[in-house]
Every structure is written in C-alpha cells, then in structure tokens.
Image: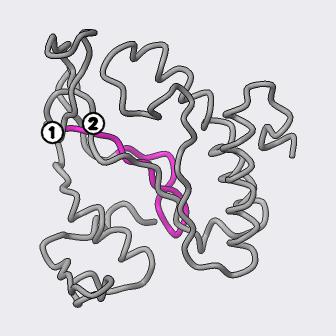
Amino acid sequence: KKLYGLDSSFKNTATFSRNCLIARRLVERGVRFVELTCTGGNGDRWDQHGGLKDGHTKNARSVDQGIAALLQDLESRGLLDSTLVVWMGEFGRSPRISKLFATPGREHWPYAYTVLMAGAGIRGGSIYGATDRYAEYVTEKPVSPADITATIFHALGLDHAQTVPVGRKQHRLSRGRPLTELFS
C-alpha cells in the first residue's frame, strides 16, 4: 500500500493509486482487460485549456505514483511480461497559446501526442518518433491512431486486420500497421 501511495495526503493520488492496486489484483486473478480512468486531479482531468502548469502538475501528482507502482508491482510478480500497460489520451495539446477562450490557453492538438506502452514484450526505455522543437508536428516516424490500435492488438496476440465485433457494429482495423519494432 505504501508503494502505491495509498497513505498519501493528496486525495487524488490515493484514489488513482487504489485503482492501480485493484487493477494489479484483477490481472493477477486472470482478468484479461482492465481500464482505468484518471481521477479529476484538477477539475477536468487532463482536458484543460488554461492554467495548464497548475492543472497538469496536480494531475501528474494524481497519477505518477500509481503508474510507477503498478509497473514495478507487475514486474516483481512476473506479470509485466504478459500484461500490456498503455497510458494515453485521445489528443495532444497545441504548442501555442490560443485566445479563443475567456482564459487564454492551449487547444486540442491531433498532430503530436504522447503514448506510453510498457510490458507484453515492449522494449523498455525507448522512444519512438520525434517532433520539432516546439512539439508541434511529428518529424520522425509518424504514427496514426490506427497504428497504435494495431500495435495493441499485436501485443495481445490478435490479428488487427481481422474483423472484430464491437457491440452490434463490425469494425475493420486493417488501416493500421503494428509497430513491431517496439518489441524486444
């Protein structure tokens, strides 16, 4: 519990960390898919347009210890090799300040973003791709959301090009390319 920060005086750290510990326990018991959502460390989680330094500092404080503990705990139990951990949002943040809002801030930005993947054979400690000096546009090894999805399917041992039932609709993921170079 100490590793996860359940004793933290910062309520949101303890809340998210408790969810990470529960996720580890579920994985340990054979649950195949676990999704965690960030707690509202600063109101609207990571979707802030203004006050980013304060807001994202609080958000990072909410999740950093739990994520680190989850990875360390899974590894110490021999579960990280067979568990894929993915940390991401649905978009990046514009590198320039916009004045469209009452409080100037940054917009949603689909041109460059960060995804963390660990475990399930992903080569640790590596960075894939790069952006320009402002983190505005990808300059090396561009990756699409379909590529990320195909990579996740690859790590799970699933053929991303097959039709996959999702609810009542059928979705084909063949547009993406698994980033096999991420794996050891």
Which mark identifies residue 147? none
Identify whether 159 is placed above or below 94.
below
| Residue type beneath disc 1 | Tyr
**Residue 102, located in which quarter of the rendered image?**
top left
- Secondary structure, mark 2, is strand
Left-right relation of 45 to 151:
right
Most common SS among magenta residues: loop
* The magenta segment: 111-127
| Residue type beneath disc 2 | Gly
Question: What is the x, y in percent for residue 110?
Answer: 17, 41
> What residue is drawn where x is 46% and y is 66%?
184
| Label 2, label 1: how far apart the Cα atoms are | 7 Å
- Secondary structure, mark 1, is loop
Left-right relation of 183 to 71:
left
Residue linked to disc 1: 111
Question: What is the x, y in percent for residue 106?
Answer: 24, 20
